[in-house]
Image (spheres, helix red, strand yellow):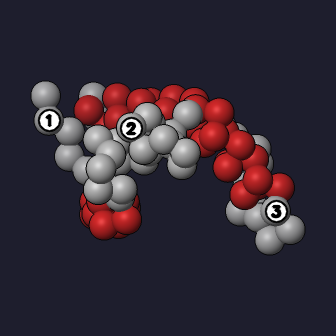
Amino acid sequence: MCWPISPLMRQCIEALLRAAEPASPWLVPAPRDPQQPLSKGALNQALRRMIRAPRGLGLEAFTPRDLRRTARSKTLSTRHA
């Protein structure tokens, strides 16, 4: 099944592709080894830093798992609407 992506998501993916490490098979590679994907821990740590920053995101704390769960719920609710 093919899932459509929003124009904003397309822009984000295109920006990642432009900035991508040419030798890496990953869209978001690990900083020290481009042959490995960015770890879940690194993503969690980056989110925590952004949320806690003095001029942070202005959001309550969340994790990538929360984002995935929300996206899944929204996708399922729009498919069955």
Q: Please name which of the two marks, 2 or 1, marks the residue nearer to the observer.
A: 2
Q: Which residue is mark 2?
A: 35
User: Image check: 45 left or right of 1?
Assistant: right
Q: CA distance from mark 2 to mark 1?
A: 27 Å
Q: Position of residue 7 (x, y in %)?
A: 28, 63
The residue sitting at 63% across, 40% down in the picture is: 42
Q: Are marks 2 and 1 in contact (CB under 8 Å)?
A: no
What kind of residue is marked 2? Gln
Dividing the image into 4 quarters, which one contains the C terminus? top left
User: Is residue 9 shown left or right of residue 31?
Assistant: left
User: Which residue is drawn at the image coordinates 36% and 56% (left, top)?
Assistant: 21
Indicate the amino acid at tag 3. Answer: Ala
In the current view of this chain or complex, which residue is farthest to the right?
Answer: 54
Residue carrying label 3:
53
Q: Amino acid at mark 1?
A: Cys
Residue 35's place in the image compared with 47, above or below, is above
* CA separation in Å, label 3 and label 2: 30 Å
* Residue marked by disc 1: 2
> Could you tell me residue 15's position as x and y percent?
35, 66
Element class at badge 2: loop
In the shown orientation, is residue 62 left or right of residue 31? right
- Indicate the secondary structure of the residue bearing disc 1: loop
On the question of residue 9 being in view, the answer is: no
- Residue at (75%, 47%) from the top-left corner? 48
Above or below, 76 against 71 in this view is above
- Is residue 12 visible in the rendered structure shown here? yes
In the image, 27 versus 14, the foreground residue is 27
Task: Using the numbered discs, state the Cα–Cα distance from disc 3 to disc 1 in whole angstroms.
Answer: 37 Å
